[in-house]
Image (cartoon, rainbow, N blue to C red):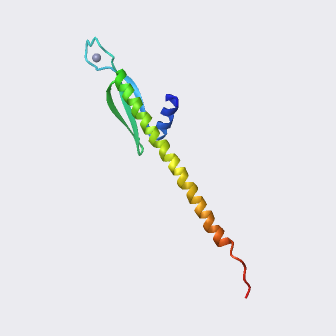
Amino acid sequence: MKSRVLREILKEYGLDFYVKYVYCGKEKCRSCPHGPYLYASRREGGKVKNVYLGKATASLLAKKDEIVRKVLELLMEYEIKNKQIEEEFKKKLSDLLQDLLSQEEHFD
Ligand SMILES: [Zn+2]
């Protein structure tokens, strides 16, 4: 799966990542802007929480990608199981209703 697609899926679950440069505000700072830094934004209820993850080095970005991949594997596994449960439910429901609706009419 392309990383853009993965990102869109995660966003639906309230998780996103972004890289940012920061101005420290110190007078005469020669290294502004600082960074790049990696952040995660997490939507919880109606609020968005931003979490600093560290300097956006190649290894941190790779670690982030690895975790994102694992999270998506979990989500896919969950959705597959969910679908199976739903199908099982529909089948059982249909069997039960079939049973109920196939009663023969008896007139005493
Ligand atoms: Zn600075």
Q: Is residue 42 left or right of residue 86?
A: left
Tell me the residue at 63%/68% (across/down).
97
**In the image shown, does 75 or 36 lie closer to the viewer?**
75
The quadrant in which residue 36 appears is top left
Q: Is residue 75 above or below residue 19?
A: below
Q: Nearer the viewer, residue 30 or 97?
A: 97
In the rendered image, residue 57, in percent from the top left (x then y), is placed at: 34, 21
Q: Nearer the viewer, residue 76 or 29?
A: 76
Instruction: Name the residue rendered at 36%, 34% in the picture.
Output: 50
Q: Quadrant of the C terminus?
A: bottom right
Residue in front for this viewpoint, 72 or 19: 72
**Left or right, 93 with reference to 64:** right
Is 72 above or below relative to 105? above
What is the number of callouts on the image?
Answer: 0
Q: Position of residue 93 (x, y in %)?
A: 59, 64
Locate residue 92, reporting x and y percent.
58, 63
Query: Dividing the image into four equal quarters, which quarter contains ligand 1?
Result: top left
> From what the image shows, is residue 93 above or below residue 10?
below
Q: Residue furthest bottom?
A: 108
* Position in image of residue 39 (x %, y %): 36, 29
Question: In the drawing, does residue 107 fall left or right of residue 94?
Answer: right
**Residue 22 shown left or right of residue 27 in the figure:** right
Q: Quadrant of residue 61?
A: top left
The residue shown at (58%, 55%) is 87
